[in-house]
Image (cartoon, rainbow, N blue to C red):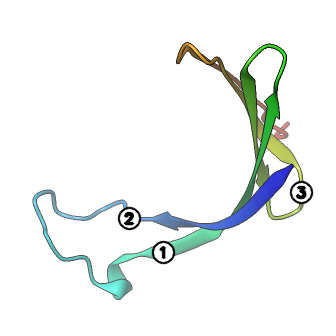
Amino acid sequence: MQEMLFEIINSNGLKSGKNVIKSEELHLEGKTKISFEEDDIDGIKIVLNKDENNNVREIKFICSCGQTKSIILDYGE
């Protein structure tokens, strides 16, 4: 399993059509981990998106034909 850590950046409120984004216009929302697994028998890739506490937030299934299906998990009440 290959796992990578990414930072989540929020750029809401930017004016559309801008070519340059200044650092003060961005907000760091948190971090997410993305894991990749591949099933050699069926050609299905599984992508796990996790938050910084290692809770799985999304499970994405990618078929070798290009179709995708996602399950999004919400831990809120």
Residue lying at the far front in this picture: please name it. Answer: 40
Gap in Å between the C-alphas at discs 3 and 2?
Answer: 24 Å
Q: Residue at x 73, y 19 (%)?
A: 43
Q: Position of residue 48 (x, y in %)?
A: 78, 41
Amino acid residing under circle 2:
Ser
Q: Secondary structure at mark 3?
A: loop
| Residue sitting at x 77%, y 42% | 57
Residue 11: quarter of image: bottom left
Q: Residue under label 3, please give it.
A: 54
Q: Closest to the observer: 49 or 62? A: 62
User: Looking at the image, which residue is at 79% across and 57% down?
Assistant: 3
Name the spot of residue 7 as percent of width and height, x first: 61, 69
Q: Quadrant of residue 56?
A: top right
- Asked if the residue under mark 1 is in contact with the one under mark 3, i.e. CB atoms within 8 Å, the reply is no
Q: Quadrant of residue 5?
A: bottom right
In x, y percent, where is residue 15? Answer: 17, 63
Which residue is the site of mark 1?
27
Regarding mark 2 in the picture, which secondary structure is present there? loop
Mark 3: amino acid: Asn
Q: Which residue is mark 2?
A: 11
